[in-house]
Every structure is written in C-alpha cells, then in structure tokens.
Image (tube, helix red, strand yellow):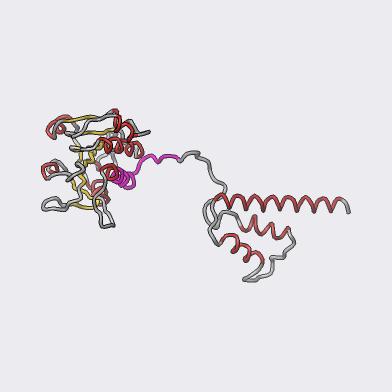
Amino acid sequence: MKRPFEIRIVLVRTIYERNIGATSRAMSNMGIEKLILIDPKCEITYEAQQAAATGQTGLQNRTTYASWDEFMKQEPESIKVAFTARDGKGRQVRDVDEVLKDIADKAPQFQVESDVPYVVHLVFGPEDWGLAGEDLEHANFCACIPTFGDNWSLNLAQATLLGMYSLRRTWGGQRTKLDGGKVRRAPQGIDGIDPEATLKTWLEEMGFDLTRQRKINVFTVLRRMLLQNTPTKKELVILETVLQQSIRKLREWKEFQNRNR
C-alpha cells in the first residue's frame, strides 16, 4: 500500500450500550480512535463506560448521526466495508481477509503515493438482525468473519474486535510492546541453553570425556532428559544459572588445588 490509511468504526442502530463500550475498548487495543454511531437505539450511560474500561477514547470522542444520509454528508470520501453473516442475493459476501487484501492490492485509492491518509469505514449492524439490505447499499464491500462452529452469530463487540484484528494482520500497524519489554535471556524451546557452551562445558569440568564419537553418551542422554519436555523460559534460565554456577565453582576448586600443590 502506497498510501497511509485511517480506520473508523461504524455501528448502525446498536441496541445495547455495553456493546458500544466494549467496542471502544477493542478499538483501543487495535489503535483505532474514531467511533461513529448511526441511529443508535440506546442511551450512553455509565454501563457503556464500564464496558469500555481502559479504552474510553472512542466512546468519549464518538460521533453520532441520525441517519445514513447525515453520515454520507458529513463523513469524508471512503471505502466502506460492511460486515454481515448473511450471504443473500446481491450481497456478494467474502471472507474479510480476502476483501482487505483486494483493497490493499487493487483499490486505486491506495495505488497512488500520498501522505494524506485515506479513510476506510468498517460497518457493523445491530445485534438482532445485523445490517439490512438498505444499509449494504452504502457499502463498497461486504465481508464476513469466518466461524468454525455451529453458532455463526457473533457478539457485536467480538465481531468488531475480530474485524479490526483482521485488518491489522493484513495491513499492519505499530505493534504494541508487551508489558515489561525486557529481553529474555533464554528463548522458548530446546535452544534455551546452549548445549556447547553450557551443558558440554559443565560435563567436561566434571571430568567426562566427550571427545569419543558416540551416538549416545552422557551429553546426549542428559540433553534429552533435561529438554525433552520443552521447558518454559523460566525453567531454562534456572537450569542455565545452575550449570554456570557449577562451572564457576568447579573452576575455583581446581584453581585452589593447583595453588596448594
């Protein structure tokens, strides 16, 4: 994509305010700030604020339009992706990942180099029957979120989160740094300790001869015993610490013996 984008979430005729609040929280997780309500069927009270929890930005800065006509007059030119779970006549519904890839690869708005972000509206319908045919007339694309169980109906807030996640996974964005942000000494898996630098060194300091070419020796046996269950990062760090401490103590003891000969 040669052009930056701005995502706006549109909720149409929403019935339950807690879903509006939960959507605001999901937006904060996905780095999206602009929430638009079209003809909401509920009031925004403390319940919505509770559901938004630490993601109040979208809720507090929301824009409300009485109708689609007002929305179309006030909102900038955009690509509108409507989410629906019904694949009726004329809807031409495709999986959301496919739709987003098509927009990125083929939409002329993103094929020109520009510093001005282009707006993409992600549109979600009410909790009872979803978007109506009249709503879809305003959309450029119809997308569905794949499900794999017998229940294909998603909660509205869950649907918005999955839709935004699909977009970020396809189009990218600034990934959130995990809490703490420290680099771990030992990565996950069997490479958590370096067999050559730690385990072998420890065995050699203990006096074992590992130079003989054998498929099974003390090193291979211990390596398999210690690492076959895919230890956690913490367990690997502890194991490495123990081995390194043993190596230091063995070397100190050998130096002490050499000095007193």
Type of secondary structure dominating the magenta stretch: helix
In the displayed structure image, the side of residue 134 where residue 259 appears, left or right: right
In the displayed structure image, the side of residue 43 where residue 28 appears, left or right: right
In the picture, residue 52 is in which quadrant?
top left
Position of residue 148 measured from the top left corner of the image (x, y, whole percent) = 28, 57
- Looking at the image, the residue that sits furthest to the right is 261
In the displayed structure image, the side of residue 261 where residue 122 appears, left or right: left
Q: Nearer the viewer, residue 212 or 250?
A: 250
Residue drawn where x is 84% and y is 53% of the image: 258
- Residue 167 lies within the magenta run: yes
- Residue 155 lies within the magenta run: no
Q: Nearer the viewer, residue 111 or 163?
A: 163
Position of residue 210 measured from the top left corner of the image (x, y, whole percent) = 69, 65
Q: Quadrant of the C terminus?
A: bottom right
Q: Nearer the viewer, residue 27 or 23?
A: 23
Q: Quadrant of the N terminus?
A: top left
Q: Nearer the viewer, residue 73 or 107?
A: 73
Q: How many circles with numbers are drawn on the protein? A: 0
Residue drawn where x is 55% and y is 58% of the image: 190
Position of residue 38 measured from the top left corner of the image (x, y, whole percent) = 18, 34
In the displayed structure image, the side of residue 207 where residue 242 appears, left or right: left
Position of residue 62 measured from the top left corner of the image (x, y, whole percent) = 26, 30
In the picture, residue 4 is in which quadrant?
top left
**What range is drawn magenta here?**
161-177
